[in-house]
Amino acid sequence: MEVAAKSLLFYVKSKLDIREFDSKPIPVQVITEILEAARYTGSGKNLQHWRFVVIQDRKNIEKLAEDSITGKWAINGTLAILVLTDPSYDFHLLDAGRVVQNMQLVAWSHGIASGLFTRFDIEKLRRDFNIPEHLYPSAAVIFGYPPRKIIGKKARRPLRLLVFSEKFGEPFFK
Ligand SMILES: Cc1cc2nc3c(=O)[nH]c(=O)nc-3n(C[C@H](O)[C@H](O)[C@H](O)COP(=O)(O)O)c2cc1C
């Protein structure tokens, strides 16, 4: 199978956050795999405090886009997953980040692109999606098939600027 032949690093390197999508629906088996990736992600103290709201209904995707501050482009997606975490744990956003990345990578291994946003009109979002007070909407991840071949390039700093050896400031890559 082509997917298995590619390394995880291939998917990490080639995944770009995309904000435009094709209208082709994502098969339910793939949605389940994306959610399995979420379920299998490790969380602080294995608390698994996260909950996920799967949104596919066009009207609700429109609402989500409306409720966003930095994700109006969500309107283009065919699937959205709202990631809710328990803010009483000081590591809840780290857990949210891990779960988001795993879902995005599994989606990408199926050729499904995604993007995320984290800024909402929280009160409106809570009302629209019935989010309980004890959970915080940490991220919305929007998925869909890319409308065309993805040819963008990642803008990333080189390792020699990011990585130190033994102590901060000592180059690891010379
Ligand atoms: C914590 C976090 C918050 C983000 N919030 C937004 C957002 O509000 N709106 C948006 O369009 N993209 C958002 N992004 C996507 C980033 O802009 C994107 O991951 C970054 O530009 C790298 O994109 P690339 O992998 O395609 O190079 C967010 C990403 C992260 C990790």
Image: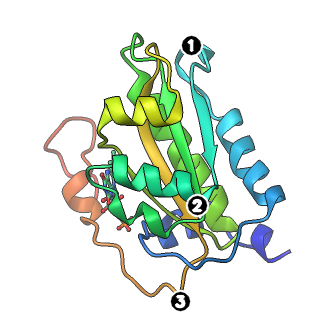
Q: Mark 2 near mark 3, Cβ–Cβ under 8 Å?
A: no
Q: Is residue 135 above or below residue 11?
A: above
The mark found on residue 96 in the picture is none
Would residue 90 appear left or right of 161 to someone viewing this image? right
Q: Residues within 10 Å of mark 1 (few under 14, many from 20)?
A: few
**Left or right of 158 in this view: 36:** right
What amino acid is at disc 2?
A: Arg
Residue under numbered circle 1: 45
Q: Quadrant of the C terminus?
A: bottom left
8 up-or-down from 145: above or below: above
Which residue in the structure is indicated by mark 3?
148
Q: Can see residue 174? A: no
Q: Earlier in the sequence, mark 2 or mark 1?
A: 1
Question: Quick check: which quadrant has ligand 1?
Answer: bottom left
Residue for point 79% across, 64% down: 27
Q: Specify how the rendered protein is coloured.
A: rainbow
Packing grade of label 2 (10 A; few <14, some 14-19, many >=20) is some
Q: Gap between marks 1 and 3, in whole Å?
A: 41 Å
Q: Earlier in the sequence, mark 1 or mark 3?
A: 1
Does 72 appear above or below 86?
below
Q: Report helix, strand or loop for mark 3.
A: loop
Q: Residue at x 49, y 51 (%)?
A: 141
Position of the N terminus, as image quadrant, is bottom right
Quarter holding residue 107 = bottom right
Q: Nearer the viewer, mark 2 or mark 3?
A: 2
Observer-nearest of 82 and 33:
82
Q: Which residue is mark 2?
A: 58
